[in-house]
Amino acid sequence: MGIRHCGAVRCVPEAAEQRTPNGEGTEKMSERNRRLRAAGIAALAWAGLAAVWCVLVPGGAAELPQGVPGTLRSLLVLPLAEELVFRGALLRLLRPLGEHPANLCQAVLFAALHGTLTEKCYALGMGLIFGWAAEQTDSPAPGVVLHILNNGLVLARALAERGMG
């Protein structure tokens, strides 16, 4: 550990300088931790919503996708596209309304595009959770991951209710 010199006066040792709590590296780490914490909260909120929804609204499993292309569409293409449109572009366009009104608007529009009234209610909850996560992390990524998981669980439930074939 060397001593850094500031002119004729000896300053703080270099190693101590690198460990300062408000250093540049810790700011990046705390921002990363904040984003991870927000994504974790969103995941827990979504899991809670999904679990409660399965108990309150039994049955009514979704239509099974047709073949590999339909499965890829349901599990990857639609979740990615919807998250980029609603929690990416639309949420950013609505920001002048304020964080909460923008989130509510995008979630209502997201819900409106889903099937039955029951599905719309569930989609509204998902849209609010994923929108909050997008605002907290400044990224639609948490919503993309959770949306893919959600659609995978919906597919698994549909397969289970139909006896896998």
Image (tube, rainbow, N blue to C red):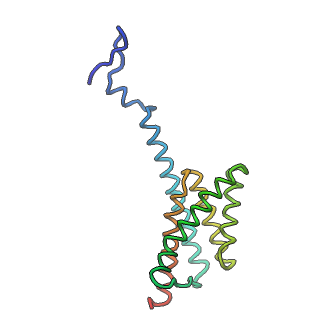
Q: Quadrant of residue 52?
A: bottom right
Question: Where residue 139 sits: x, y (%)?
Answer: 54, 54
The residue located at (65%, 74%) in the rendering is 114
The residue located at (52%, 73%) in the rendering is 151
Question: Where residue 8 sits: x, y (%)?
Answer: 35, 8
User: How many callouts does the rendering have?
Assistant: 0
Q: Quadrant of residue 119?
A: bottom right
**Depth check: 45 or 132 in front?**
132
**Depth check: 81 or 134 in front?**
81
Question: Where residue 118 sits: x, y (%)?
Answer: 66, 77
Q: Quadrant of residue 112?
A: bottom right
The residue located at (67%, 61%) in the rendering is 106
**Depth check: 48 or 27 in front?**
27
**Depth check: 61 or 48 in front?**
61
Q: Is residue 29 above or below residue 163?
A: above
99 displayed left or right of 82: right
Q: Is residue 96 above or below residue 16?
A: below
Q: Residue furthest front?
A: 69
Pick the quarter of the image with the C terminus: bottom left
The residue located at (71%, 49%) in the rendering is 96
Pick the quarter of the image with the N terminus: top left
Question: Where residue 18 sits: x, y (%)?
Answer: 36, 30
Q: Residue furthest top?
A: 8
